[in-house]
Image (cartoon, rainbow, N blue to C red):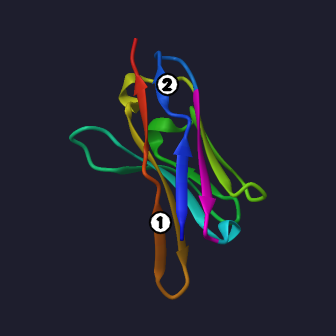
Amino acid sequence: QVRLVESGGGLVQPGGSLRLSCAASGIIFSSYDMGWYRQAPGKQRELVARITSGGSTNYVDSVKGRFTISRDNALNTVYLQMNSLKPEDTAVYYCNARLYRSRWSEYWGQGTQVTVSS
């Protein structure tokens, strides 16, 4: 059974920092591309950052220079370090794992709330 369990969300003031973690089980973690998505109320879910199995990263423009995605294959965990947080970063953040082997296999975590407010 595949499980992705996020943690680290919460309430933070503008300009503050949070680090999200996503612990994976039931998959060969090192083979998967890992991503963080977010969904704000009334908006579509969007990709925030992705790190490939090879370690390449990409970010949505709105978080470049502020967020950093990383992975620890020994711990089966992916992280999202979020600095200089803004109110518009408020959303539920979801962990995603995907692998292409003739077809996509994709898994999601349950989400963790991040609220940026004074």
- The quadrant of the rendering that contains the N terminus is bottom right
In the picture, the disc for residue 86 is none
Quarter of the figure with residue 65: top right
Assign the magenta stretch its main secondary structure: strand
Residue found at the far bottom of this picture: 102
Q: Is residue 22 magenta?
A: yes
Instruction: Give how far apart the Cα atoms at labels 2 and 1 are.
Output: 27 Å
Amino acid residing under circle 1: Tyr
The residue indicated by pointer 1 is 107
The residue indicated by pointer 2 is 85
Amino acid residing under circle 2: Leu
Please determine whether, in this image, residue 108 is positioned above or below residue 13: below
User: At numbered mark 1, what does the secondary structure look like: helix, strand or loop?
Assistant: strand
Please determine whether, in this image, residue 112 is positioned above or below residue 14: below
Where residue 62 appears, as percent x and y from the top left, is 44, 37
Residue found at the far front of this picture: 1
Q: Residue at x 54, y 23 (%)?
A: 84
Residue found at the far left of this picture: 42
Q: Is residue 100 magenta?
A: no
Where residue 106 appears, as percent x and y from the top left, is 47, 70
Q: Magenta part of the protein: which range?
A: 18-27
Quarter of the figure with residue 32: bottom right
User: At numbered mark 2, what does the secondary structure look like: helix, strand or loop?
Assistant: loop
Q: On the picture, is 87 further left or further right than 34?
A: left
Out of 113 and 41, give the one closest to the viewer.
113
Q: Residues within 10 Å of mark 1 (few under 14, many from 20)?
A: some
Q: Residue at x 66, y 53 (%)?
A: 77
